Amino acid sequence: MSVSQITTHILDTGSGRPAAGVAVVLSKLDGGSWAPVAEGTTDADGRIKNLGPERVPGGTYKLNFATGAYYAGQGADTFFPEVDLSFTVSDAGEHYHVPLLLSPFAFSTYRGS
């Protein structure tokens, strides 16, 4: 299996463990609206390595994380029913890793490697 140009990883900082089983949708901004490109679910390590094609054209993309469903499955409440992270792909040949650090009442992200 090849690795996608765009990948993600979720760490549940409240439990200190990877967030497994989180549904994620990758979309591209196209003419003022979001068009889905790919979808996946985080594995036992909280990662999705095959989210979308091996190469995507430059543009603005968004990852939508179904955090509400994840926490409902944990029997916990959360303030964020979903998290949207938008970012720019400026170099179509470069790898883009977008991690999410998540807790029931906060989240953080950064450009990973």
Image (cartoon, grey):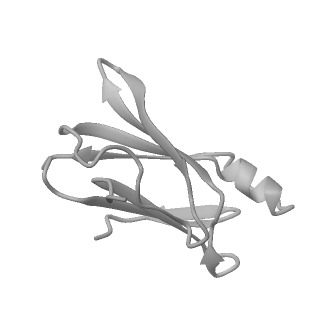
- Looking at the image, the residue that sits furthest to the right is 75
Residue drawn at the location 61% of the way across and 70% of the way down = 44
Who is closer to the viewer here, 6 or 67? Answer: 6
Q: Position of residue 2 (x, y in %)?
A: 32, 58
- Looking at the image, the residue that sits furthest to the top is 31
Q: Is residue 55 left or right of residue 91?
A: right
Q: Is residue 97 left or right of residue 51?
A: left
Residue drawn at the location 68% of the way across and 62% of the way down = 105
Above or below: residue 44 compared with residue 39: below
Q: How many marks?
A: 0
Q: Position of residue 111 (x, y in %)?
A: 31, 64
Q: Is residue 79 visible?
A: no
Residue drawn at the location 62% of the way across and 46% of the way down = 82
- Looking at the image, the residue that sits furthest to the front is 1
Above or below: residue 37 compared with residue 97: above
Q: Is residue 20 visible?
A: yes
Q: Is residue 96 left or right of residue 90?
A: right
Residue drawn at the location 32% of the way across and 59% of the way down = 3
Who is closer to the viewer here, 46 or 112? Answer: 46
Who is closer to the viewer here, 49 or 104? Answer: 49
Q: Quadrant of the N terminus?
A: bottom left
Name the quadrant containing residue 106.
Answer: bottom right
